[in-house]
Amino acid sequence: MPATSARRAPSAGPRRESKPISFRPQAAHPFDDRCLSWQYDAQTVSIWTTAGRIKNIRFVCSADALKTLREHRKGESDLIERDGVFYLIAVCEVPEAPVNEHPDGWLGVDLGIVNIATVAGMTPFNGRGLNRHRKRQLELRRKLQAKGTKSARRRLKHRRRKEQRHAANVNHIISKKIVTEAARTSSGIALEDLGGIRERVRLRKPQRVTLHSWAFHQLGTFLAYKARRAGVPLVHVDPAYTSQQCADRHHIEKNNRVSQALFICRNCGVVAHADRNASRNIAARGEAAWIAGRESRVPATP
């Protein structure tokens, strides 16, 4: 008789008895299609609960979101509660468009704090409004925290995550415009690989808040998934010296970057907007990376 082995079931020790299994009130509650059904025309849901099935629960969403729900919803839905408001998060499997393997050009995206994103040939996405909003929220939090009253704490709780939602909305707008332009011109997108920048950069204390609240990773994530849905190729490139390199003659020198906005090449004398010049360098590196990493289309010799 062949030897068999069996794992012993873990015994219920004192730790398990003293701390029984419980559900966190703020945790997400998953529902599959057996427990929750959607009525898209009426914009209602029917949910099975411990007290029985509750029908005709209204939900609100945009027209585009409703169309996506109707056409692509699949799998479970999660019910969460945030600040007294219930959200029903549905999983949608949206098919990706075929990737354009032969783009006509490349859009280099230079990320920054003064200009959130700069693409050559497009109006820079200025970060003045977002930075002003963040500064205003920071000052308000300081005042409320210093006040320390019950109403101040209630106000702080009510305003939490407001800055994150505003920044996410700005990043959605920027990424949508860039991907739309790339799809319109049959171009690819080259993006800086800024992983670990917070650990590498050394800044003065007043500048650290600005850097750590800079949601460049979120913007890159939005660009990536929007590009996949539109069939736009996207590559990440090394950002080293892109702000010091001349996009025309490729001369690299620290003194080329005269100021935040001005670039003057010490070799050929070309004058350009610093972020636009960096964007052109990123685009060139993106094209080179795409050609080097793309599968060869040359037919095999007989």
Image (tube, rainbow, N blue to C red):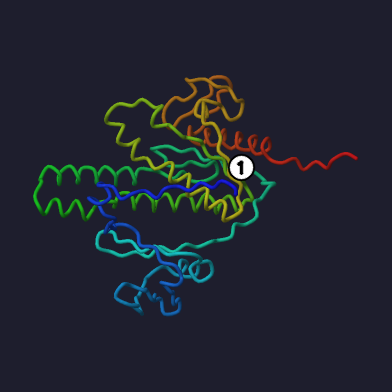
Q: Is residue 155 above or below residue 36?
A: above
Q: Residue at x 10, y 52 (%)?
A: 150
Residue 46: percent from left, percent from top: 38, 76
Q: Residues within 10 Å of mark 1 (few under 14, many from 20)?
A: many
Residue at the extreme right of the image, as rendered? 302
Residue 54: percent from left, percent from top: 33, 77
Determine the image quadrant of residue 147. Answer: top left
Please name the residue that numbered disc 1 is placed on. 106
Say which of 280 and 7 sits in front.
Answer: 7
Residue type highlighted by circle 1: Trp
Residue 168: percent from left, percent from top: 38, 51
Q: Is residue 14 above or below residue 206?
A: below
Report whether 152 appears left or right of 117.
left
What element does badge 1 sit on? strand
Report whether 104 appears left or right of 192.
right
Q: Residue at x 67, y 46 (%)?
A: 104
